[in-house]
Image (spheres, rainbow, N blue to C red):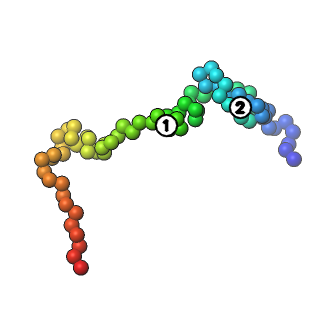
Amino acid sequence: MAKADIHPTWYPEAKVYCNGEVVMTVGSTQPELRVDVWSGNHPFYTGTQKIIDTEGRVDRFLKKYGMLDTTAPAPEATEEKK
C-alpha cells in the first residue's frame, strides 16, 4: 500500500491544451498541461514533413567553399578478381 501524505495529487482527467484548445485528456499530477506541439499538429505525424537535406551536408559545405573538385570524375569501385 502507498504511504499516506507523500505522493502528489493524481488528476485522472487532466486536460492538455495546445493553442488554447483542449486536445486530449490524460492522467497527470497537474490539472492542466499546456503544450506547443502534440501529435495532432506535428509535421511527422500529420505527413507534412519536408526533407530538406537531399544532398549530404559535407558535400554541400565543400561545394560552397570550393574544396570539392566538381570537374574530376567520381572514383569507380574496384572489383576484386578471384
**Measured from the top left, where is residue 24 in percent x and y?**
68, 31
| Badge 2 vs badge 1, beta-carbon distance below 8 Å | no
Against 71, is 31 above or below?
above
Say which of marks 2 and 1 sits in front.
1
Q: Is residue 22 left or right of residue 80?
A: right
Which of the labelled discs sits on residue 47, or is there none?
A: 1
Residue located 78% across and 34% down the image: 12
Type of the residue with mark 2: Thr
- CA gap, disc 2 to disc 1? 24 Å
Q: Residues within 10 Å of mark 1 (few under 14, many from 20)?
A: few
Q: Is residue 58 left or right of residue 49?
A: left
| Residue that label 2 marks | 25
SS of the residue under disc 1:
loop
Residue located 31% across and 45% down the image: 56
Disc tally is: 2
**Measured from the top left, where is residue 59 in percent x and y?**
26, 45
Residue located 62% across and 20% down the image: 20
Q: Is residue 29 left or right of residue 18?
A: right
Q: Which of disc 1 and disc 2 is earlier in sequence?
A: 2
Which quarter of the figure has residue 9? top right
Where does the C terminus fall, quadrant-wise? bottom left
Which residue is farthest front?
47
SS of the residue under disc 2:
strand
Q: Is residue 42 left or right of residue 59?
A: right
